């Protein structure tokens, strides 16, 4: 398993230190962090599967790392809203 982890490491997003603050990412950075394409991220945004914020309607989208991580685990924005209700 250790050898497999070493082989996969270059393809995984960089590890974040536990105390590091969750910074905002633009769409390109978020897609790269998630290991997906910009098109796939835009589809997830349209389906409201991933949480994002915009400066204004139709403006640039911004993402938090925790929201991208939740999306990758299958815990999309819609499922979070259902749990909160």
Image: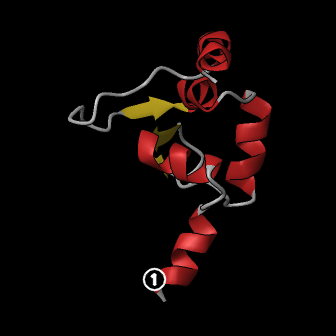
Answer yes or no: is residue 44 visible: yes
66 relative to 9, above or below: below
- The answer to which quarter of the image holds residue 2 is top right
Residue 61 in percent (x, y) is at 53, 40
Name the residue: 60% across, 46% down. Answer: 58
Q: Position of residue 49 (x, y in %)?
A: 67, 58
Left or right, residue 17 beside residue 39 = left
User: At 55% from the left edge and 31% from the top edge, which residue is drawn?
Assistant: 30
Q: How is the image coloured?
A: secondary structure
Residue 70 x/y as whole percent: 54, 53
**Residue 18 vs residue 36, the one in the foreground:** 18
Camera-side residue of 43 and 60: 43
Vertical order, 5 against 17 (above or below): above
Query: Is 4 above or below relative to 49?
Result: above
Choose between 83 and 10: the one closer to the eye: 10
Q: Quadrant of residue 68?
A: top right
Q: Which residue is mark 1?
A: 84
Q: Give the residue at x 67% y 50%.
A: 45
For the point 52% across and 81% down, which residue is it?
Answer: 83
Say left or right for 16 vs 85.
left
Residue 65, percent from left and from top: 44, 39
Query: Helix or strand or loop: what does disc 1 sit on?
Result: helix
Q: Is residue 55 visible?
A: no
């Amino acid at each position: 398993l250790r050898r497999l982890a070493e082989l996969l490491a270059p393809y995984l997003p960089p590890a974040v230190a536990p105390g590091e603050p969750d910074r905002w990412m633009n769409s390109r950075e978020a897609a790269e962090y998630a290991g997906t394409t910009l098109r796939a991220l835009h589809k997830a945004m349209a389906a409201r599967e991933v949480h994002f914020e915009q400066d204004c309607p139709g403006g640039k989208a911004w993402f938090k790392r925790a929201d991208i991580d939740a999306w990758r685990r299958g815990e999309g924005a819609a499922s979070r809203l259902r749990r909160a209700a």
